Image (cartoon, rainbow, N blue to C red):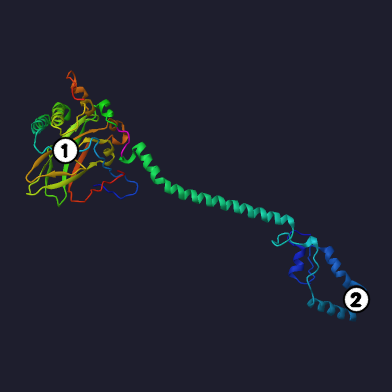
Amino acid sequence: MGGLWYPGWRGVAFCGWRWIHPGSPARAAERVEPFLRPAWSGTGGTERGLRWLGTWKHCSLPARHPALQPPRRPKSSDPFTRAHVEEWRRRNKTTLTYVAAVAVAMLGASYAAVPLYRLYCQTTGLGGSAVAGHASDQIENMVPVKDRILKISFNADVHASLQWNFRPQQTEIYVVPGETALAFYRAKNPTDKPIIGISTYNVVPFEAGQYFNKIQCFCFEEQRLNPQEEVDMPVFFYIDPEFAEDPRMINVDLITLSYTFFEAKEGHTLPVPGYN
Amino acid sequence: MSTAMNFGTKSFQPRPPEKGSFPLDHLGECKSFKDKFMKCLYDNHFENALCRNESKEYLECRMERKLMLQEPLEKLGFGDLIGGKSEAKK
């Protein structure tokens, strides 16, 4: 029988209709043969023909031949297909379990990322965050890179509500990486009441900030100035010798250190940015 | 303060100083050393390398007056300036 034409289709689609497929001459011959019997006379033939047509109404689906059953029906009781379906169901379930596990793992990884990233930053020192283990014996052993002269310029700012006069005592200083340097700022309280200030600093360019190490300065702690008092504020710092080996710093010759003073009020804490 | 809120750009992270904060010199006890240092800087066109002796003396003054924690000078990067000087501050 032809590939496309399932014999069973005939039983399904054409109830009782005796479909004669042109490609099946043998079957056609079987079907047509009774009508070609000699008993088929002229007058009686019409009756029989009508009777035959009449039986068309009372047709029922022809008896199922086992070979005519379509093997694709999902509700078949064929054990072979049932095993297939079971196999697909089992595979789907496994896939779903795997996908769900991956989703849960991703969620867990996103929670774990915060402390892990902090740890990573501390060990590699990327982004200028605090490098653990930066001991003072590094200062002892560091060798100045004498052929790389850097200009450090100083800037001083005050917050609008702080009435200090705050300015650097030198506009710039020439240092080399690996050499400790001292610089001074001066602050005067021209008012007649004591004022407490607290300062923070900034280094431009940002990438050079990770090499700018302050040994001691006057920032991040409250400094109190009595009325009409003027003090010198030193900054003791050095540029890390590794600055000279960083390819990104190859064009950096000017580093600007900028201090800003704010007024420290009772109960106020200066928000220090970063992971301190 | 640099708070560049751009994703991916580096922003500056201020770090506290390694040895903390200098106490303020309210009484001006080390002012003369500071003036010597500033004069040296002005004379030498602000080259730090030529004025390291003066900065060392200023820090020693601070350490004597308890305005700074006692530290061996090598740890402050003045190892090459100590030379034959006897190291009594340890």
In the rendered structure, the answer to whether residue A83 lies left or right of residue A64 reads left
* Towards the viewer: A82 or A109: A109
User: Is A46 located above or below residue A145 in the figure?
Assistant: below
User: Is A154 located above or below residue A10 in the figure?
Assistant: above
Question: Which quadrant of the structure image shows residue A209?
Answer: top left
x, y percentage for residue A201? 21, 43
User: Is A260 located above or below residue A74 in the figure?
Assistant: above
In the rendered structure, the answer to whether residue A199 lies left or right of residue A96 reads left
Question: Where does label 2 land, which residue?
Answer: A40
What chain is tagged by disc 2? A
The type of residue carrying mark 2 is Trp
Q: Which of the image's four quarters has the C terminus of chain B?
A: top left
Q: Residue at x 55, y 50 (%)?
A: A98
Q: Which mark is residue B23?
A: 1
Q: Please state the extent of the stretch shown in magenta in the rendering.
A: A130-134
Q: Residue at x 87, y 81 (%)?
A: A47
Predominant secondary structure, magenta span:
loop
x, y percentage for residue A188? 9, 44
Question: Which quadrant of the structure image shows residue A246?
Answer: top left
Q: How far separated are the C-alphas under marks 2 and 1?
A: 130 Å
Question: Which quadrant of the structure image shows residue A83?
Answer: bottom right
